[in-house]
Image (cartoon, rainbow, N blue to C red):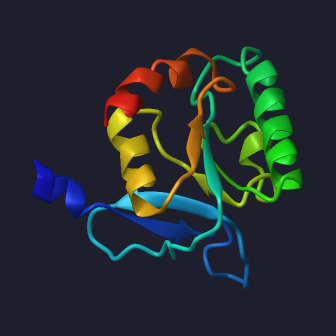
Amino acid sequence: MKNWQASRCIRWWTPALQEFPAVTPYFYSTHDATSEIVKDDRKKILILGSGPIRIGQGIEFDYCTVHAVKALREEGVEVHIVNNNPETVSTDFDTSDRLFFEPMQLEDVTNILRTDSYYGVMVQFGGQNAVNLAVPLKRR
């Protein structure tokens, strides 16, 4: 199982489908390529979003996530978000420094954390989906 996990990598995704030059901070994981994440020494925080939830339930999570990003950026922190819900403001191309369109599952979030050096993970803005990952992530 360890070898299988080690083969996962993060790739950059452009919603323009290479039709025109576009620089977006969107990323996804895959098994058949080399990672396109470039590690650096910047202080980074990973915020776990709400993931897929019913329409009308996520506005408070999204609001809190966006304001957390703004506050952390004011402090000079690079902010990355994990959220696979495309209908939120937190998944807009200019909200975070990196956006990972990944399932809100332990394996997927752990894979993201292994790709770079993170100072911390914030779970309190993503609702129950994110909070449920707090203890399992701490154990890893």
Left or right position of 73 against 114 = right
Which residue shows up at 77% across the image and 16% down it? 56
**Residue at horizontal 12 percent and vertical 58 percent from the top:** 3
For the question of whether residue 84 can be seen, the reply is no
Quadrant location, the C terminus:
top left
Q: Is residue 83 above or below residue 79?
A: above
What's the residue at 22%, 61% (across, down)? Answer: 6
Question: How many numbered discs?
Answer: 0
Residue lying at 43% horizontally and 42% vertically, measured from the top left: 109
**How far across and how far down the image is residue 74, in percent?**
89, 53
Q: Nearer the viewer, residue 41 or 112?
A: 41
Dividing the picture into quadrants, the one containing residue 125 is top right
Q: Classify residue 70 as left or right of residue 49.
A: right
Identify the image quadrant of residue 76.
bottom right
Would residue 10 be seen by someone viewing this image from the given angle?
yes
Q: Nearer the viewer, residue 41 or 6?
A: 41
Residue positioned most to the bottom: 21
**Of the pair 38 and 49, the residue shown nearer to us:** 38
Q: Position of residue 101 (x, y in %)?
A: 54, 49
Residue 27 placement (x, y as % from top left): 54, 61
Residue 88 position within the rendered picture, expressed as x and y whole percent measured from the top left: 75, 37
Q: Nearer the viewer, residue 129 or 46?
A: 46
Q: Is residue 79 above or below residue 129?
A: below
